[in-house]
Image: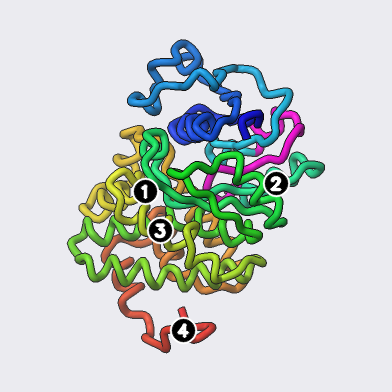
């Protein structure tokens, strides 16, 4: 679709990567950047220094007035304020992962509150920005309430090297995208504390079970968590060297304090704010989420690493696929 107009809101690493991918798919791209240093040069991009912008991309500090789709690549905690500044001229797609801390709402729910008159969707999957920008093979999911709409929007960005699958389960996709950051902190701490690869694999697998329960309770489908937005994203974020959440977990596992880790300024670490919000959501719906709960308590300082290990390893062992087994 060479005539498509795509607006990307946010010129961080992920926004830049999505803009490059949209241009690669033949779209004309409006990339909104808040920071003056990003606007100053098309060749040197602070958040993705190895990338350069094709001519089909227009960098601007102005919000788009026309578009066929608007993609939000901003931190979830800032989505509401920024979304309110964007005119509702096209379907809006959340390309951020997490839960709004003040409301426990998912990104599409935030957008629906701010702009109820346009369609909303979410793009999520196992994607590191620098690899998408480089054109390396990858896949993701674009989910809307309508699978037909999801397919049409996905076609605007799909190329042979970036395969976008359609889904009509935006809730399940968003639960996977939010929770994988929290689980990655736990996975990193497992390795950092020297508990071994077996422990990390077991932790990741059992986490999928609790995410399925949470997704079902929120109106999504548990099976969505077995796909790209669930186990796919979980694998990448729990094992990939570029994962900020896993890196934070590694440091925690080695005995560093959360305060000292956060002072390094290595970008947004969504799992830190997402953990308490997901735990609040789970408790409100009566869902058992032992890994998420343990991470939330560890991050707030209520328990230490030794307590966290004991909480998970001393749980009763039950039937693996029992409906209510944690």
Q: Is residue 96 magenta?
A: yes
Q: Gap in Å between the C-alphas at discs 2 and 1?
A: 27 Å
Label 1 sits on residue: 245
Q: Main secondary structure of the magenta part?
A: loop
Image side of residue 190 versus residue 44, left or right: left
Q: Secondary structure at mark 2?
A: strand
Q: Residues within 10 Å of mark 1 (few under 14, many from 20)?
A: many
Q: How many labels, in total?
A: 4
The answer to the question of whether label 3 and label 1 lie on touching residues, with beta carbons closer than 8 A, is no
- Where is residue 259 drawn, in percent x and y? 34, 42
Q: Secondary structure at mark 4?
A: loop
Q: Residues within 10 Å of mark 3 (few under 14, many from 20)?
A: many
Image side of residue 238 versus residue 31, left or right: left
- Where is residue 149 drawn, in percent x and y? 70, 50
Report the span colored magenta.
Answer: 80-104
Residue closest to the far bottom: 319
Instruction: Tell me which label, 3 or 1, sits earlier in the chain.
Output: 3
Above or below — where is 152 with respect to 229?
above
Instruction: Tell me which label, 4 or 3, sits earlier in the chain.
Output: 3
């Amino acid at each position: 679709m060479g005539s498509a107009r795509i607006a990307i809101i946010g010129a961080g690493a992920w926004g830049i990567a999505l803009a490059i991918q949209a241009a690669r798919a033949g779209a004309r791209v409006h990339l909104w950047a808040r920071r003056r240093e990003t606007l100053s040069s098309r060749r040197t991009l602070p958040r993705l220094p190895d990338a350069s912008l094709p001519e089909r991309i227009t960098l601007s500090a102005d919000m788009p007035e026309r578009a066929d789709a608007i993609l939000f690549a901003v931190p979830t905690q800032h989505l509401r304020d920024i979304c309110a500044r964007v005119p509702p001229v096209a379907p809006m797609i959340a390309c951020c992962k997490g839960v709004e801390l003040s409301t426990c709402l998912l990104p599409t729910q935030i957008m629906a509150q701010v702009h109820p008159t346009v369609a909303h969707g979410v793009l999520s999957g196992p994607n590191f920005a620098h690899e998408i920008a480089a054109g390396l093979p990858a896949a993701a999911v674009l989910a809307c309430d309508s699978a037909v709409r999801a397919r049409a929007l996905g076609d605007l960005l799909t190329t042979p090297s970036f395969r976008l699958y359609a889904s009509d389960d935006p809730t399940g996709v968003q639960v996977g995208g939010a929770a994988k950051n929290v689980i990655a902190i736990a996975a990193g701490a497992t390795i950092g504390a020297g508990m071994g690869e077996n422990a990390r694999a077991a932790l990741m697998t059992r986490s999928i079970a609790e995410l399925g329960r949470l997704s079902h309770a929120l109106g999504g489908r548990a099976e969505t968590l077995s796909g790209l937005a669930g186990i796919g994203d979980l694998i990448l974020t729990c094992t990939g060297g570029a994962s900020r959440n896993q890196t934070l977990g590694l440091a925690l596992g080695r005995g560093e304090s959360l305060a000292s880790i956060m002072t390094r300024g290595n970008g947004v670490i969504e799992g830190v704010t997402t953990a308490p919000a997901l735990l609040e959501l789970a408790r409100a719906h009566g869902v058992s989420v032992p890994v998420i709960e343990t991470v939330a308590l560890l991050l707030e300082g209520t328990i230490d690493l030794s307590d966290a290990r004991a909480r998970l390893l001393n749980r009763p062992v039950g039937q693996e696929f029992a409906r209510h087994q944690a």
